[in-house]
Every structure is written in C-alpha cells, then in structure tokens.
C-alpha cells in the first residue's frame, strides 16, 4: 500500500512539474581542451551565441574550455555516455576509437594548403567520413580548422637526423607515431593539458603544434627553437551525441544546424589570422627562435617521412589515400 501511495505521489508530482520542465532550456554542454582565445575556442563561443539567439533561448550552450571537464583521452567516452553533448576533438582522436579512416588527415604533407583542405571537407569525401561516426554513437556536424603544424624543441631542427633520439609529445595517433619513428625520434602520447609542464621539466624534448596552440599554451617559453615546417594539419570534427541530437525537435535541430554553419565559417576564417598573429607574438617575445627551412631541407624532410604513407595504407586502405590525394592535388592545379 505504501509503495502504491509513493508511486501515485511521484506520478502526481511529475504531472505538476511537467509544464515547468517543458519551459526549461535544452542544455548543451560543449567541452574542449584548448584555450578560449584559440580558433576552436572562439568558434565554440560563436556557436553558443548563435544557437541561443536562433532558438530564442530554448537552447542553452555551456562551453567548457581548457580541459575543465575532460582531458583528451576522456572526452569522447564522456560524449558517448551522454555526460556531455558536444565536442570538437582533433581528427587524430577518431582512429583510436575505431574510425581509422580519419587517420588520413594526419598524413604529413598530404594537405598543401587550405584550398585543398576545403575541397575535401566541403565535398562528398568529407561528408562520407562524417557518416562513419554514426556507428560510434555520435553525429558529425562540421570540420573546424586549427591550422598547419610546426616543430619545436630545445635544439635546432633543420634536417631529419636532428630528430634522432628526441622524445616528442604526440596525440594518440598511429600516423603521428609512425611519423616520428621515421625521423628516428621517440613519440610519447600525452594529453594536451600536460604538454607545457612536460616540456618545462624535460619529460619530452619537443612537440608539434599550430602557432596559436603554441602561443596560447606558452610552449614557446619553454622551447628554444620553432621550425616552420607546415608538415601537418590539425583540424577538428564537431560531434554531438547521436541519441541527444536525434531526439531534438526538428525545428530546434534546424536552428542549431544554421548556428553551426555560421560558427564554422567564422571560426575557420579566424584560424589563419590567429596563427599569423601568434607567430608574430612569438617572434616579438624573443623567447624562441623561428627557423625557416630551405627548399633542400624541406625536400629532405618530405623524403624521410615518405614511408609513413605505406604504413597508413596498410590500415586505412590505399584507395582512400589515393582519393584524398586526388582531391587535394586537384585543388592546387
């Protein structure tokens, strides 16, 4: 009898509370691991503003930068479990969870410029890659730029042999692991939030990153040299928990799609500018020397890293790499 009364009371409370609950905004927790003033951080804030504006307050977006909620290794699991609704992990993060096709973005020198990148991400190949994320309980919404990577260390890196024996921090990526092993370096997987301290204390000797990440995380203060290699690209895929996304009212989803499209255009336009500004600030600080490779040094680096393509082809398939190359080469012709 007591259980029956408790159930009835609970049901009554639920009925009374239902109208009030219906007026509560839909909360989207958007977690990311970089600083708020990076390209990704700025795009996330832009999405928040536009999403709340276009839904007239029916959606509230809470942005958590700088690994406030989760570190690199934790965030995708948190999304799949529904602890957060939205992330923008780097392309490298999807290989370790079984979507190995995204490894192609990590191949060194595969993307000559942003025009080539857009041809991939805005075309059918980019859409097809996003669709692969459905099986992992997430929906891919957009591709966001960070920029092209540079190498840093406490010794000058101008030739492949300069990397030999150095410990380099990498994201969890078999491609990046193979890249540094091809150079004779020792790759060390490490969370982004731990890199500065690891460089400062000598746990690792160097790292690769975009200028905006290097500057906002103050890595240039604990690295003597930054070599402008532009050897690789860091980009992000904005993903949302699939069950959450599919459960949204269609009109709300359409408004969020619109907000995401505009935030993507804004963030990607900011990326190149932020990286240029960061390089200038690093140069002005005088704390790290910026090194530009000669054409001969650049060619030697490219040749040393060539074996990585064969290694990646064994996992993602040569046809995908060939399709990627066809798109990117076509964009620059």
Image: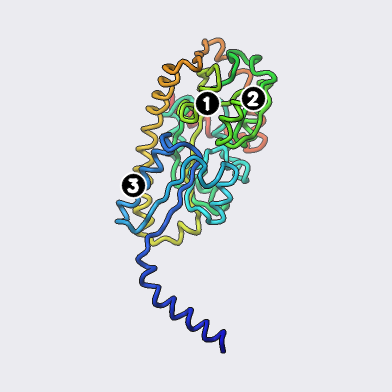
List the residue tagged with mark 2. Answer: 202
Residue drawn at 50 percent across, 59 percent down = 243
Question: Eyeballing the image, is 262 above or below 160?
Answer: below
Quarter the C terminus occupies: top left
Q: Quadrant of residue 98?
A: top right
Q: Could you classify mark 2 by the number of other residues whose Cα lies within 10 Å: few (under 14), some (14-19), or many (20 or more)?
A: few
**Label 3 secondary element:** helix
Q: Are marks 1 and 3 in contact (CB under 8 Å)?
A: no
Q: Could you classify mark 1 by the number of other residues whose Cα lies within 10 Å: few (under 14), some (14-19), or many (20 or more)?
A: many
Farthest-out residue, bottom: 1
**Label 1 secondary element:** helix
- Specify whether 104 is left or right of 48: right
Residue 117, how many percent across, how many down?
45, 32
Task: Count up the numbered dots.
Answer: 3
Mark 1–mark 3 Cα distance, whole angstroms, equals 30 Å
Question: Eyeballing the image, is 142 above or below 112?
Answer: below
Q: Earlier in the sequence, mark 1 or mark 3?
A: 3
Q: Quadrant of residue 123?
A: top left
Question: As rendered, which of 290 and 160 lies closer to the eye?
Answer: 290
Q: Earlier in the sequence, mark 2 or mark 1?
A: 2
Residue drawn at 37 percent across, 45 percent down = 47
Residue 276, how many percent across, how many down?
40, 23
List the residue tagged with mark 3. Answer: 49
Q: Could you classify mark 3 by the number of other residues whose Cα lies within 10 Å: few (under 14), some (14-19), or many (20 or more)?
A: some
- The tag on residue 219 is 1
Mark 2–mark 1 Cα distance, whole angstroms, equals 12 Å
Residue drawn at 40 percent across, 51 percent down = 61
């Amino acid at each position: 009898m007591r259980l029956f009364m408790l159930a009835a009371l609970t049901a009554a409370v639920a009925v009374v509370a239902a109208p009030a609950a219906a007026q509560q905004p839909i909360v989207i927790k958007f977690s990311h691991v970089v600083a708020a003033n990076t390209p990704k951080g700025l795009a996330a804030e832009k999405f928040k503003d536009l999403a709340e504006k276009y839904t007239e307050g029916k959606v509230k977006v809470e942005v958590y930068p700088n690994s406030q909620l989760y570190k690199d290794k934790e965030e995708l699991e948190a999304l799949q479990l529904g602890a957060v609704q939205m992330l923008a992990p780097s392309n490298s993060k999807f290989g370790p969870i079984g979507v190995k096709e995204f490894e192609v973005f990590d191949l060194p020198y595969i993307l000559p410029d942003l025009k080539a990148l857009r041809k991939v991400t805005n075309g059918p190949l980019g859409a097809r890659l996003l669709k692969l994320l459905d099986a992992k309980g997430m929906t891919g919404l957009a591709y966001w730029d960070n920029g092209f990577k540079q190498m840093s260390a406490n010794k000058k890196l101008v030739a492949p042999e300069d990397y030999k024996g150095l410990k380099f921090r990498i994201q969890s990526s078999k491609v990046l692991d193979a890249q540094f092993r091809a150079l004779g370096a020792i790759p060390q997987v490490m969370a982004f939030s731990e890199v500065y301290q690891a460089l400062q204390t000598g746990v690792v000797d160097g790292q690769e990153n975009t200028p905006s990440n290097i500057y906002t995380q103050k890595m240039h203060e604990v690295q003597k040299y930054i070599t402008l290699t532009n050897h690789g690209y860091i980009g992000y895929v904005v993903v949302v928990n699939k069950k959450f996304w599919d459960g949204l009212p269609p009109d709300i989803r359409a408004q969020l799609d619109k907000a995401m499209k505009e935030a993507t255009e804004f963030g990607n336009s900011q990326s190149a500018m932020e990286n240029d500004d960061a390089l200038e600030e690093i140069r002005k600080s005088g704390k790290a020397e910026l090194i530009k490779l000669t054409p001969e040094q650049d060619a030697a680096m490219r040749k040393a890293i060539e074996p990585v393509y064969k290694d990646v082809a064994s996992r993602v398939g040569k046809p995908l790499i060939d399709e990627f190359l066809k798109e990117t080469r076509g964009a620059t012709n």
